[in-house]
Image (cartoon, grey):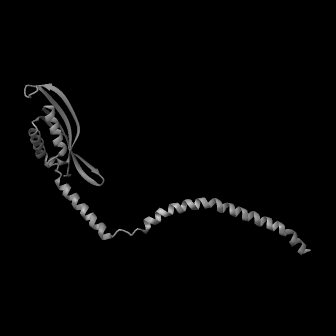
Amino acid sequence: MRIKRIFTNIPLLIGIFIIIYAALGLVYFQKQAERRDLDSQIIPIRTVLEKPAPNLQELEAELAKAENQLETKWASFPSSEQGIELYDALVDMAQGNNVEVVSVVASKPVEKEDGGISYTLLPFNLNVQGSQSNILAFVSSLARGPGLLQSSEVKSINISTGTSANTTDNVTRVANLQLYIYAQPD
């Protein structure tokens, strides 16, 4: 009797086994696409990991070179205490371009920090007068920034027209320039 019972339950056990096998197969095939995606993500990571690590001495040498370049460039920036020299450089540059400086107003220096580097922003408001070509030559000279003015930036310019007997074409231009000079902090 027991043997009969075992044989009658065998089809039931086979059915349960087939259902479990089918469920596991279904899960396997569903995860196969996910596994392909993960494999495609692993390939680029392996190529990065297989590259040799940079030599610490080479990195330190590059860092030292970059710091030296930064110090060299930084030394060429004017200090905020060089206001009189900056004013003289602006006037000399204007005269070199046949432009008359009508007024120079220096605003209060602003301490700034960008990317971990501290600097002082020296804002100037200049009013200059001359022919249009001379004013544009002056602005171009500012953009090239020789000497103390090499760290300057013309933020805005407004040119208006007036008349004067001082210029050959009897038309003089008056330009208002907003100039920023980046300097070393005090």
Image x and y of residue 130, in percent: 12, 32
Image x and y of residue 151, in percent: 20, 48
Q: Residue at x 31, y 66 (%)?
A: 59
- The reply, left or right, for residue 100 in relation to residue 56 is left
Question: Looking at the image, is 115 positioned above or below residue 140?
Answer: below
Q: Hey, which quadrant is residue 9 in on the image? A: bottom right
Image x and y of residue 93, in percent: 11, 41
85 or 143, nearer to the observer: 143
Q: Residue at x 78, y 65 (%)?
A: 16
Q: Residue furthest right?
A: 1
101 or 22, nearer to the observer: 22
Q: Residue at x 76, y 67 (%)?
A: 17
Question: Could you tell me if residue 105 is visible in this image?
Answer: no
Q: Hey, which quadrant is residue 49 in on the image? A: bottom left
Q: Hey, which quadrant is residue 176 in on the image? A: top left
Question: Could you tell me if residue 93 is visible in this image?
Answer: yes
Image x and y of residue 15, in percent: 80, 65
Question: Looking at the image, is 123 positioned above or below residue 159?
Answer: below
Please give the count of numbered marks on the rendered protein: 0
Q: Quadrant where the N terminus lies?
A: bottom right
Q: Residue furthest left?
A: 166
Question: Looking at the image, is 47 positioned above or below residue 120?
Answer: below
